[in-house]
Image (cartoon, grey):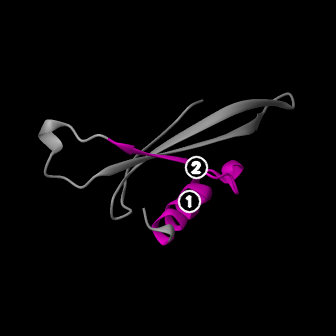
Amino acid sequence: MDKEIVTSINNKVYRRFPELNGKAPKIRSQNSSAKNARSLPTYLFVYSGTVMISGNKTMPRLVRVVVNEKGKILKISTSR
């Protein structure tokens, strides 16, 4: 994947989840299923970090972002 596309995706994720700012994602290519054979290849970005919750406690946070080859974010999901 192109470095400029990865940087653009990172900036979008950091704006939405500021606690992940500066965390590098793990990037994996996803297999396309038979019905999606004509669509562009997709990639999974996995960000991990921690977030402060009440009582000065921390909670781990995982953010998964599915992106197509051109850099369009298709789906974002997060753990609580």
Dot 2: what SS? loop
Going by the numbered disc 1, the residue's amino acid type is Asn
Q: Residues within 10 Å of mark 2 (few under 14, many from 20)?
A: some
Q: Residue at x 73, y 38 (%)?
A: 51
User: What crowding class fits label 1: few (fewer than 14 Cα within 10 Å), some (14-19), or many (20 or more)?
Assistant: many
Residue at 58%, 49% in the rendered image: 25
Q: Quadrant of residue 57?
A: top right
Q: Position of residue 21 (x, y in %)?
A: 69, 55
Q: Is residue 55 left or right of residue 67?
A: right
Q: Nearer the viewer, mark 2 or mark 1?
A: 2
Q: Is mark 1 on a helix, strand or loop?
A: helix
Badge 2 amino acid: Pro
In magenta stretch: residue 60 = no
Drawn side of residue 28 relative to residue 7, left or right = left
For the residues marked 2 and 1, what is the alpha-carbon distance in whole angstroms?
Answer: 8 Å
Residue at 29% x, 40% y: name it: 31
Residue range in magenta is: 4-30
Is label 2 in contact with label 1 (beta carbons under 8 Å)? yes
What number is the disc on residue 25?
A: 2
In the displayed structure, 29 sits above or below 70; it is above
Give the labeled residue for mark 1: 10
Give x and y (percent) for residue 10.
Answer: 56, 59
Residue at 85% x, 27% y is 55
Q: Percent from the top left, x then y, of residue 36?
A: 17, 44
In the rendered view, would you say 25 is above or below 77?
below
